[in-house]
Image (spheres, coloured by chain):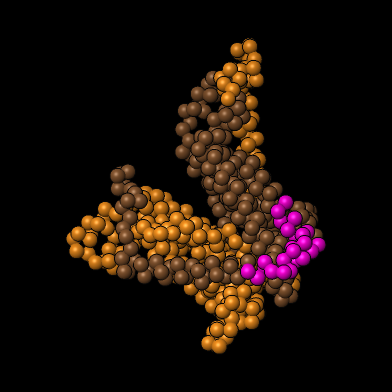
Chain colours: A brown, B orange
Amino acid sequence: MSAPSVRAAPTERARLGAWSGAGLGIGVLWLSVLVLLPLAAVVAKGIGPGFWDAVTSHEALTAIRLTVVSALTVAAVNAVLGTLIAHVLVRDSFWGKRFVEALIDIPFALPTIVAGLVLLALYGQHSAIGIDWFATRRGVLVALLFVTLPFVVRTVQPVLLALDPEAEEAATSLGAAPFTTFRRIVLPAIAPAIASGSALAFGRAMGEYGSVLLISGGLPRASVASQYVFGQIEDDRYAQAAAVSTVLLLISVAVLAVLGVVQQRVARRG
Amino acid sequence: MVNTITDTPPVVAPPPVPATRTRRPRRRRLVRYLLRFVAVGYVAALVAMPVVVVTWRVIDQGWSVFWEAITAPEAIHAYKVTAQVAGCAVLINAVFGVGMAILLARYRFPGRTLLNVLIDVPISVSPIIVGLALVLAFGWTTGWFGSELQSAGIQVIFSMPGMVLATAFVSLPLVLREVLPVLEEEGIEQEQAARSLGANAPQRLWRITLPTIRWALAYGVVLTLARSVGEFGAVRVVSGDVTGQTQTLTLVVDQRAEQFEPGAYQLSVLLIAMSAICIVAISLIRPRGER
């Protein structure tokens, strides 16, 4: 419907008037009161004299290490299996495909505590299939994989759909094996989408709480950082909670920034 | 870079031509089946089977157990609390999202790019940190503004306002991110035409802008609603989790699951049904918005 000419270019944007200026003021004030000031309060509380002791205590370190390792694993698994699922959903057709398509959205729509509960029914002590990963790191990983399933699939899918199949057909007709075609033709085009999907999955896994809670059983050996922070809040140790939270915020920001740079490079080269 | 064409033949194309003709399609089909098996198997093991097992157990325990669980006094109270909190959060984020999207799409001002980035911050913050942040800002004894709020007699933390703030925080960008691309795609021709024909600002908003973004807005509202009803960690921190007072539905599910009280599965199935309805609503809205 809309021709390229009616696209709002930056030059078409108007100057602020009295009403729009007031609206912007209210919006920015709301964002500051709700998001920016409270987050600043966490960092201000966290970076104090006790910061180093709070972050390097055995329990805190264990929780942070488990969280970072799990989040990196989740990002890697999603990069491979998420891409595979997106590829199958776009290029393959089989009975029940639409059902699988709908299942991908469930982790986004399902409350995290319910996600934890249903996973416990299959991978917990009273497992329906005899797999007991209750209070293990493997159980934590399953919960994190559940909640991050849609990220890579949903970022890669539209890029694959928009990809011109001609180049792939040409490669195939010239005798390239399926995997060679994928690696040489498809992968370079979808790499930025895989990277951004994995980055989103990593960020989500770093901060996940609800889905991990039940399957980890709250035991220190399988507790992620957000569970540790919650424990500190419950014990009124706000400085410790804020210190570990600050570390988590910093790690997330750093990794997202690095992936953003990588993604820009890949996009520019492609 | 190595040349693709000269690089590949030794790997896949052995000299006898008839052999490759029969072998390659078969191998390709095998690869396709293998990929399909892995993809479907992974989604089934991770998503479908757990949900089916819980639903099956609820059916197995019978209708009367289900009815008893979902009509328990704490559950009924939790429905009300959840509806109030989620309703407020959706309303706040719909107004904020549409207003901010219009400002970002139609106006230029210093800090516009920065604002666009900051709005996405809430999505990547852990719900527990969200709760902690609100406690350290608004708690009576713990917060930056605590003493002012206490002397004014306004309790935010451990009561409804804090739960609404926490829920609005975690779902802040969802409406805006759906509405903004539609506004940018649509351009300003219709709005300019309406203005030149004498329509004032509220008329332009009501007659031109809102009809343009209605499907995107509906989509964003459904996403916000699902996120708000399902919010758990942030609400757990700021609510105090008091049974029969500040418990949302997800907090009741957690309490029943952790203390092995009956009803966790039943209430979960209720929430699973809600998620399924949201997914169906989204799949109905999405194609209309794209048309």
Q: Is residue B35 magenta?
A: no
Compare residues A33 and B263 and report the one nearer the observer: A33
Say whether residue A157 is visible: yes
**Count of marks overlaid on the render:** 0
In front here: A180 or A91? A180
User: Which x, y percent locates residue B118?
Assistant: 50, 60
Give the answer, above or below, for where B22 lies relative to A35. above
Report x, y in % for residue B107. Answer: 35, 59
**Residue in the image at 58% along x and 58% along y:** B124
For the point 43% across and 68% down, which residue is it?
A: A27
Looking at the rendering, which quadrant does residue B12 occupy?
top right
Residue most toward the top? B16
Q: Is residue B78 visible?
A: no
Q: Is residue A47 magenta?
A: yes
Spot occupied by residue B178 in the image (x, y as percentages of width and height): 44, 56
The boundaries of the magenta stretch are A44-69
Residue B38 place in picture, x, y as percent? 65, 40
Left or right: where does residue B138 sit relative to residue B97? right
Q: Residue at x 41, y 53 (%)?
A: B181
Dominant secondary-structure state across the stretch colored magenta: helix
- Asked if residue B86 is positioned above or below residue B182 in the image, the reply reads below
Instruction: Give the quadrant of residue B233.
Output: bottom right
Say which of A167 and A17 sits in front.
A17
Q: Is residue A104 left or right of residue B243?
A: left
Q: Furthest residue to the front? A: A49
Q: What residue do we see at 61% from left, 40% from top?
A: A84
